[in-house]
Every structure is written in structure tokens, then in C-alpha cells.
Image (tube, helix red, strand yellow):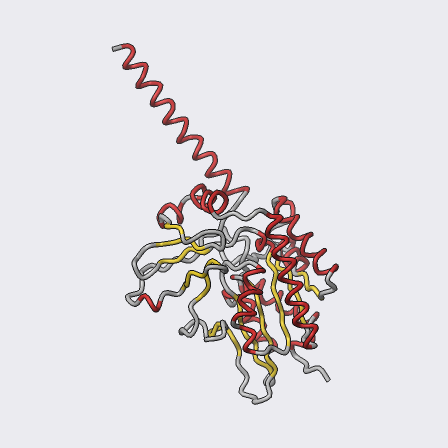
Amino acid sequence: MPKLKELIARTLLIVFGTVFGLLVCEVGLRWLYPIAIMTVEAKPTDDPARDEIVYDASLGFRPRLGTAEYDEDGILRATSFISKSEDARRILFMGDSVTAYGELMTALGRLAAPADASFLNGGVTAFTIFQEVEFFFRYQIRKKPDLIVHQFHVNDLQSSRFAGRGSDGTVRMYSPRLKPIDVNPTLYRHSHLYRFALANLQLRFSKDEMKKATLEAVQRMRAYARERGIPYHVVLFPMLAPKERWVEYDLDTYAFYRRLARDLEIDVVDLWPVAERMIAEGKEVRLRSWDFWHPNQAMAEEAAKYILQRIPALTTRAK
């Protein structure tokens, strides 16, 4: 009997120690390594052809085109501003979820979309830069843009992934690295540890791989733009927190983007001064309290004004 009690005590100690350790890791990750909760449909669609996300062997995933959300050329319908002018300039905005969510696009359109230009939202949630460029050359190139504004986000060198619910009701994580992985939606919504494991143990590219792929992709975009005389601008979007709260990964990525733009002689509009000023003034800049990636309306409007000051071609046709 004493041995049984001792065994039970040791077992309980191990269980409680493990649970306590997991809770400490969970809290630590929420503070040091926040991971966004990606959108997952509440209900599956009835028609498999209507699934919003399509598995793609090289991209990992992409939005389904020719739907109410995206047109056949990979442009978001709802947050694009289409001119009625027959000779309107086509200005393409490329990027990840900051572009796709539409706050920045809406602010730009409200402040400056001229009658002779269409502002085309080509953003795709959870895409990295090399995915954005491949998506452009597959689909968006058909729009024949006259000017390209490519938004780089500080989180774009993290492994690309997207969670979505298919017509069969199963939530899956999509990534260029592997075939779709089934995801427990409850754990994904509530556990940073679970998200961290998916992102870093199963879907991870090394940062050197991501840097190499990003460099090659941007070189490809620059070559395309220069060969056709198309202005190509980069907008650098920061983490929405004081820099002392940025992790080393984010600081290194930010510096990498700055070097890349300088070395390739690409015009870059860095939005960090906008975020830094608003944060110093005590203004809220985040779309949601836990979200360090996406701007709220106030931040989007200030960012839009800053972009328009530095890219006058958005409102003025070149002579």
C-alpha cells in the first residue's frame, strides 16, 4: 500500500508539474512570441467548388479566383477602387493580410483615388513575399499594371501558413512546405503552444531560405518593372509595438528589408515613423488588442497620408 501511495503521489507530481510547465510556456509565448489567430470560417460551404482556399503544389495555397471575393486575375473586388475612365491607370497594391484586410486600401482610396486611376487590391492573407510575386506572375500580371506598390511586412520572413475550413468541415493548415495538415480548431484558437508547434515544428522554412527566396522574388519584380518602365515602390510595414518589444527575428527582418531595398535601388516607404509617432502619443494603432500586425482605421489613415506624400504618382499621372 505505501508503494501504491508513493506511485500515485509521484504520478500526480509529474502531471501537475507538466501542466504547470505548459501553462508557463503558454503565458511566455503569448508575451514573447505572439502568433495571430487566422480566420477560419464558422461553417463549411456546401459546394466544394466554393471553398475559398485552393491547395497549390508550389504556392502551398491560394485564394480561389473568379468568386465574389477575388476576380479571375487575383484582385479583391470589395476593397479595390475601379475607375470608369477608359484610359485609367491601373495601380496594383501587392501584399499580405495588411493589404488584403483593406483598412489601408480603403484609406488610400478615400483620400486619393483619382478619377483616372484604378486602385487594385492584390493582397492575399498569409502570403510571404515570394508567394506574392509568384501569384503576380501567374494571375495579376494580366491586369498590366502601370504602377506597382508592394507592401513588405516585418512578419513576411516567417513561414507562410493559412488555416481554413473546407467543404468537408475539416480545418486545415496550408503551407508551401507540406501538404495540408489537419488542425484542431479549438486548440488552434485558444493555445499559443499549439499554434507555435504547427508553425515552427511542421511548417517551418529556415530564415536563410526565406531571405534567399525573398531576394530572388524581389529581383524578379524589379526586372519586370524596369524592363517595362513601370514604377515599382516598396512600402515597409512594421510591427505595431515599441521597438524594445520587437523580438530579434523582427529586428533582423526589418534591417534585411532596408538593405535589400538599398542594394536593389528600390524606392521604399518605411511606415515605422508613423507607428512610432502614434505610439509615443499614446494612440491605439492596432486593429485588435492582441494583434501586432494589422492597423486600425486611425493608423491606416495616417499611413495612407504618409504613403501619398512619398509616392506622388499615386495621384498624378506621369507626363
Foreground pick, 213 / 315: 213
Please state the horizontal and vertical placement of residue 156, each as a whole percent of the image. 57, 55
Occupied quadrant, residue 7: top left
Foreground pick, 300 / 17: 17
Please state the horizontal and vertical placement of residue 115, each as a whole percent of the image. 59, 85
Horizontal placement of 131 versus 167: left or right? right
Residue sticking out furthest to the bottom: 86
Q: Identify the residue at image location x=36%, y=27%.
A: 15
Residue sticking out furthest to the left: 1
Foreground pick, 71 / 228: 228
Q: Identify the residue at image location x=61%, y=44%.
A: 247
Horizontal placement of 162 versus 256: left or right? left
Occupied quadrant, residue 67: bottom left
When the figure is inspected, residue 228 is found, relative to residue 103, above or below; the finding is below
When the figure is inspected, residue 226 is found, relative to residue 275, above or below; the finding is below
Q: Identify the residue at image location x=50%, y=59%.
A: 58
When the figure is inspected, residue 11 is found, relative to residue 143, above or below; the finding is above
Please state the horizontal and vertical placement of residue 63, each as a whole percent of the image. 44, 66
Please state the horizontal and vertical placement of residue 161, each as a whole percent of the image. 48, 54
Horizontal placement of 316 versus 64: left or right? right
The quadrant of the rendering that contains the C terminus is: bottom right
Residue sticking out furthest to the front: 57
The quadrant of the rendering that contains the N terminus is: top left
When the figure is inspected, residue 149 is found, relative to residue 34, above or below; the finding is below
Horizontal placement of 232 versus 62: left or right? right
